[in-house]
Structure formats: C-alpha cells, structure tokens
Amino acid sequence: MMRPPQPLAIRVTHWINVPIIIVMAASGLQILVAYPNFGPQGAQYGWMPQNFHIPQVLRIGGWLAGARHVHFACAWLLLANALVYLVYLLASGEFRRRWFWPPRDAGSAVGAALGYLHIREAPRQRGLYNGLQRAAYTGAVVLGVALVGSGLSMWKPVQLHRLAWLFGGYEGARAVHFLSLVALALFIVGHLVMVAIHWRTVPEMITGGKPGAHEGVE
Amino acid sequence: MLSRRDALRALAGLGLAACDASKPKRGILGVGERANERVQSALLGDHEVSAGDITPADAFPVYHVAPGIPMPPAGWRLLVTGDVERPLSLDLDELHKMARTDARIEHHCVEGWSAIATWTGVRLSEIAKRAGARETEYVNFRSFDVPQGGTVGYASCWDRESAMHPQTMVAYGMNGAPLGPAHGAPVRIYAAVKLGYKQVKYLTEIQFISKRLGGYWEDQGYEWFAGV
C-alpha cells in the first residue's frame, strides 16, 4: 500500500511542534534577557552581538525563574516529539524521500533555487520534494539537533561535559544555541513564504493527501 | 454560592494558570521542576572539573543581597550544627589548619554568564567528618548577608550528594589570595555542581538536616536543585 504524502506520524509531530517551538523560543529569549551577552565575563566574544534588546512581545515567562521553568518543562515535550518523529522517519524509511543526500539532491537543489530566482526555468518536480526542499527540511532537523545538544550542554555543563565539549564548552554552547535559534527562525520564515506560494501543501499537511499523489510525476 | 472569582480560579487551576510563570513552583511548572530534579540528581556524578583561563579580578561579578558589601560580625565563627555528633565552631585559623583543597572551576550564574576562578578551602565532606555529621538528606547554608529591612540572612539548602561532592568546599581563598569581602569573606561555599545562587557567601552556619528548606532565591521561585 502506498503511503500518503504526509503520513499521520509526520503530520501529528509537525503540528505539535508549532506551539512547542513558539514556547521554547519565547521563553528562551526571556532567559537571554537576564544576560544578553556572549562569551565569558571579561572575555566576551567580539564576533557575537552583545548587550542587545529583546522586545517584550517575543518573550514568554515574565521573568527569569518563570521562563526557566517554562523552558525546562516544555523541553521534555520537544524532546519526546522529536524522538517520535525521528524513530518514525528511520523505521518507516520516510527519511529517504525527505532527507538531503547530496549525490542525488545537489543538482535538483541548485536547479530549484535558480528557478525561484527566475534565473533559469526550474526543473520539473519528481516525487514529494525537490533537492532544495530536502536541503531546507534536513537543515531544520540539524538545527533541532544542535538546539537540543547545545541546550543540554548549557543546562548541565559539568555533568554532561563531554557533550558540552562538542559545542566548545558552556559559552560555545550558549552561542550555538542562540545562532541555531536565529537560523531556525529564518528557516521558518522561508518555510511560511514557500507554503504561501505553494498553498496546496497545507491541506496535505492536515489530511495527509492522496496516497501516491506525488509519486507518478515525472 | 460559587463566586465568579472562585469559578475563574477553578478554571484557571485546570487550564492555563496551572502553568503560571509567576508562581513557577506550582502546577505544571512545579511538576516539571520536580521531574527535572530527579533527572539532575540521577546525572550527578562525583567527577571533578578543571576550567580554563582565569577571569580577570575586576570582571568577576560581585553579588550580595545586603545594600553594601556585608562585613562579618565581631567574633565571627563558622558553626557546624544539626544532626552532628560534635557541633563545631571554627574560626579562620582552625579552617586553615584543616586539609586544604584547590580547584579551578567555571562559575555558572542562573542569569547565563560564566567566569572562572581558582578556589582554595576545606572540603565540606572533611568538615562533615570532623563534626561527625550523620547522613542527613539535606545540608543548609546560612550567611550574614542580610537584605535591607530583613532579619534573615541569605541561605540555601542542598541535597547531600552535591554537598559531599569532592570539589564542594568551604572556600577561604580565591585565585591564590585570601577571599575578599566582595566574594564572600571570611568564607563561602564553592562547588562545581551548582548554579551560583546556591553557593552561599558570607557563611555563618552549616546545618546537617533531614527537612528540606528553601533559600533566598528558591523561595522566590528559582529552582531548588539548580545543578550544573
């Protein structure tokens, strides 16, 4: 039996992710307000923004302790949702038509990008996603892994010191955590623009779509 | 009759206010903190850390809750009390004579900043041994850092395992010099495994207790375990 373009597990985890990411990002920004700088005391990073303002409207949690409680409670939901998604993707083989594999997807990604820029006519789409979509969605998963890994490293820089080492220690993890959030925000903006352009994908992400809908397109 | 206010409160209790960030110890957020505490406790190991470059002296932030830098009361001594065979009252000389430990540790403030210093002092486990402290579940730290208009000094209560970590010490030295008044003189608690606000400065008393107490920031809503 053919799977619909958006199987149930992917739709459910996708929509659960929406409120979780909003709450995690907004509570994270409220936490950052307490010390909006990067790098150790007395040796702050010249290559990171320092002492910047974060508008109230982007924050949840009201104050540092409140935002930390929200962030750490919601982090478990994020992790559980992410694990369901990843286990499903790997076990079902769905990752094959979703994740970016350069030998297969690099040419298609460049072609699609040039098409969007009106430099060249876009190649006809084969299957569910073109190379550019695969690159973008895989990038978002990588950002998610970076956010969770750097977040755990900031939370437990001593007990999880080996993980923290991968991110350059506590301060490195802090910078990675913030930069990954910025990158994820850019991805989401791009994602929403593309969804607005290709609005037919929205009902598919809700109902799943017709099984095999994209498979026959040559 | 159920007043409108009660009805709203009941509704809120079921719904969103169970996640009221202004009272983070209650509702869903409280459940979250207690779940996190079990994870933190399980993650806690006794490995020791050694950090990198020392933060310049003027860049290491100075925090206290009193309006000015707290100065020790005349005749200051460190009391070790609670469930102990031999309650202690130690002055600085007596602490200096005990086995000394040094550790270079990265300080993690709940606000997000970090700073590094070398700390010198006596392991808390050493002091516990000398006092014949029983294996109580909690250890409470009290100080003479009293907020304006307050009567009780800054305090914080710890789980026993973190208190007995090999790098948890009563510190009397910082970066090779005697601990200065800005950083908690005469002695303070220093450890690798807790956030900064758990590391009580201007120490007056160490209590080995079976009842869990809060602390200055914990009572205002900050996490109790606050391990790193």
Image (cartoon, helix red, strand yellow):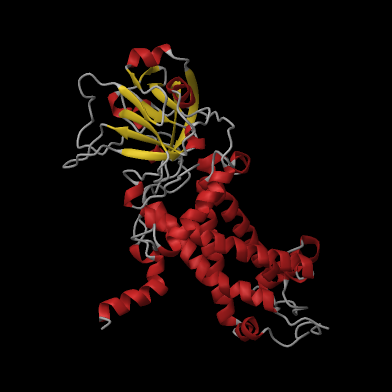
Q: Taking the image as drawn, is residue A195 in sight?
A: yes
Q: Across the whole image, how many numbered discs are drawn on residues?
A: 0
> In front here: B113 or A71?
A71
> In front here: A144 or B185?
B185
The percent position of residue A189, horizontal first and vertical second, equals: 52, 70
Residue at (43% x, 57% y) in the render:
A69
Q: Is residue A202 above or below residue A43?
A: below
Furthest toward the bottom, the residue is: A210
> In front here: A108 or A208?
A208
The percent position of residue B101, horizontal first and vertical second, equals: 49, 19
- Quarter containing the N terminus of chain B: bottom left
In the picture, residue B183 is in which quadrant? top left
The percent position of residue B100, horizontal first and vertical second, equals: 47, 16
Furthest toward the front, the residue is: B85
In the picture, residue B157 is in which quadrant? top left
Residue at (54% x, 50% y) in the render:
B38
> In front here: B221 or A39?
B221
Q: Taking the image as drawn, is residue A190 in sight?
A: no
The percent position of residue A55, horizontal first and vertical second, equals: 35, 62
Q: Is residue B49 above or below residue B172?
A: below
Q: Is residue A102 above or below residue B214?
A: below
Residue at (31% x, 79% y) in the render:
B7
